Amino acid sequence: GQNIDQPTEMTATEGAIVQINCTYQTSGFNGLFWYQQHAGEAPTFLSYNVLDGLEEKGRFSSFLSRSKGYSYLLLKELQMKDSASYLCAVTGGGNKLTFGTGTQLKVEL
Amino acid sequence: EAGVAQSPRYKIIEKRQSVAFWCNPISGHATLYWYQQILGQGPKLLIQFQNNGVVDDSQLPKDRFSAERLKGVDSTLKIQPAKLEDSAVYLCASSDRGAYTGELFFGEGSRLTVL
């Protein structure tokens, strides 16, 4: 089976940096995804990590440590539009993508 | 490129009634997923198709939920009879490479309210 843990809520200030952590346990790891979901909308893809290390894409970066079962999503230069739920998801055996419960990020002035 | 299409966007029914949701994936995407997302939770996989074959339906409540993907394109998810706890958003997603390496593209979802 798969188990994914991430904080329920986080609050940060516009222009700041925030790190959203995700820990996971899975049988047969094939990759870790981060998705962004605004209220009332569908999830949209942010990043994919399969090897250890940091993947950078503009203001967003994602880190993976497979030995520790740990990932984080780093958001820089926060904007109000970044207020959303951030979903950590893991692909395990069987080509199956399992999502965590999501971290609700609130960006304040 | 057209995205994943779902209908209806909203549906309100009473418990014990039936409902059906339709999904049209992105053209050429072999893998299709149905997820259930209850308010405040992450999406939960109900069923995964590869072309018109079922890859995983281990979390599908088969006593009331059914899904099919005719000709490996469109898919329908049915609930009969509905229960109060089925109130959720039903998300359809498709992928051209599957979840191993491929990004999932989601539709806007079908929001079900069971009274």
Image (cartoon, rainbow, N blue to C red):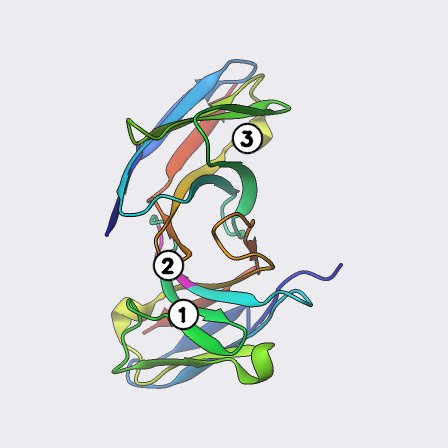
| Image position, residue A85 (x, y; %) | 44, 39
Question: Disc 3 sits on a residue from what chain?
Answer: A
> In which quadrant of the rendered view does residue B74 lie?
bottom right
Question: Disc 1 sits on a residue from what chain?
Answer: B
Question: Disc 2 sits on a residue from what chain?
Answer: A
**Between B50 and A89, the one nearer to me in the picture:** B50
> In which quadrant of the rendered view does residue A94 lie?
bottom left
| Local secondary structure at mark 2 | loop
Main secondary structure type of the part rendered in magenta: strand
Residue wearing tag 2: A94
| Local secondary structure at mark 1 | strand
**Between B40 and B1, the one nearer to me in the picture:** B1
Labels 3 and 2: the sequence-earlier one = 3
Q: Is residue B63 magenta?
A: no
Q: Residue at x 60, y 76 (%)?
A: B73
Mark 1 touches mark 2? (CB < 8 Å): yes
| Image position, residue A6 (x, y; %) | 31, 34
Q: Specify the farthest residue to the right.
A: B1
Q: What is the three-letter code of the residue carrying label 3?
A: Asp
Label at residue B31 = none
**Between B76 and A82, the one nearer to me in the picture:** B76
Q: In this view, does B76 lie to the left or right of B96?
A: left
Q: Residue at x 31, y 71 (%)?
A: B60
Q: What is the three-letter code of the residue carrying label 2?
A: Gly
Nearer mark to the viewer, of 3 and 1: 1
